[in-house]
Image (cartoon, coloured by chain):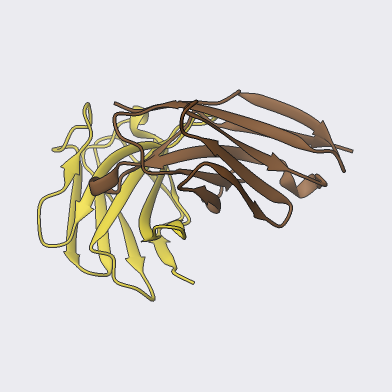
Chain colours: A brown, B yellow
Amino acid sequence: GQSLEQPSEVTAVEGAIVQINCTYQTSGFYGLSWYQQHDGGAPTFLSYNALDGLEETGRFSSFLSRSDSYGYLLLQELQMKDSASYFCATNGGATNKLIFGTGTLLAVQP
Amino acid sequence: GAVVSQHPSWVICKSGTSVKIECRSLDFQATTMFWYRQFPKQSLMLMATSNEGSKATYEQGVEKDKFLINHASLTLSTLTVTSAHPEDSSFYICSARVGPSSGYTFGSGTRLTVV
């Protein structure tokens, strides 16, 4: 089976930097993705790491260490609109099933 | 970009009735779609994989006779919640894979309330 664990909640202030961690246990690993979901909305794709290292996309960066079964999403220059739930996810290889982590609710305060 | 259109956005139905949710890929062909359920303040749980022209694959613990999935064309997948009960009230959302590094695109979701 697959399990991806995240902290349930994180709070930060506007303009700050926040890191959301994800540790995973999977029977097969085909990369780690990150999604943002605002309350009542659909998840939107943020970033994907197939290999170890850092991927940067604007204010968002994602890191992966396959040897540690660990990844994180880094959000810089936080804005109020970044308040949302963030999910790490991994797909099931040949099945392409996307399995989500437990999710982290980020609250950005003024 | 790849868009999946999901309808309805919300539905209220009486206990014991059936509800059909549709997902259409608008600008691409989706041979596979995924159906998720999300309860408040929880993660998205994969229910089933919908395969065009063949039977759906259900995750462990999901009742295939209760959640009927049909994928009759390359652009349309439907989920029917049969004999709905209040415990089926949830947010249902479909998804399709766009590409290895492009992630998955999601429908806008359907909020189902069974009264």
Q: Residue at x 11, y 62 (%)?
A: B53
Decide if residue B18 is in sight here.
no
| Residue beneath the point at 60% across and 29% down | A21
Q: Is residue A54 visible?
A: yes
Residue A52 image point, x, y percent:
52, 41
Q: Is residue B26 left or right of residue A109?
A: left
Q: Is residue A81 above or below residue B59?
A: below
Which quarter of the figure is the N terminus of chain A placed in? top left
Residue placed at 21% from the left, 28% from the top?
A: B60
Q: Is residue B30 above or below residue B38?
A: below
Query: Relative to A29, is B72 on the left or the right?
Result: left
Where residue B11 sits in the image (x, y, percent)? 41, 49
| Percent coordinates x, y for residue A68 in the rendering | 50, 25
Q: Report x, y in % for residue B113.
A: 42, 39
Residue situated in front as seen by the camera: B25 or B67: B25
- Residue B64 lies in what quarter of the image? top left
Relative to residue B56, is residue A40 drawn left or right?
Answer: right
Q: Is residue B25 left or right of residue B69?
A: right
The number of numbered discs placed on residues in the rendered structure image is: 0
When asked about the image quadrant of residue B106, the answer is bottom left
* Residue found farthest to the left: B54
Q: Nearer the viewer, residue A52 or A96?
A: A52
Quarter holding residue B8: bottom left
Q: Quadrant of the C terminus of chain A?
A: top right
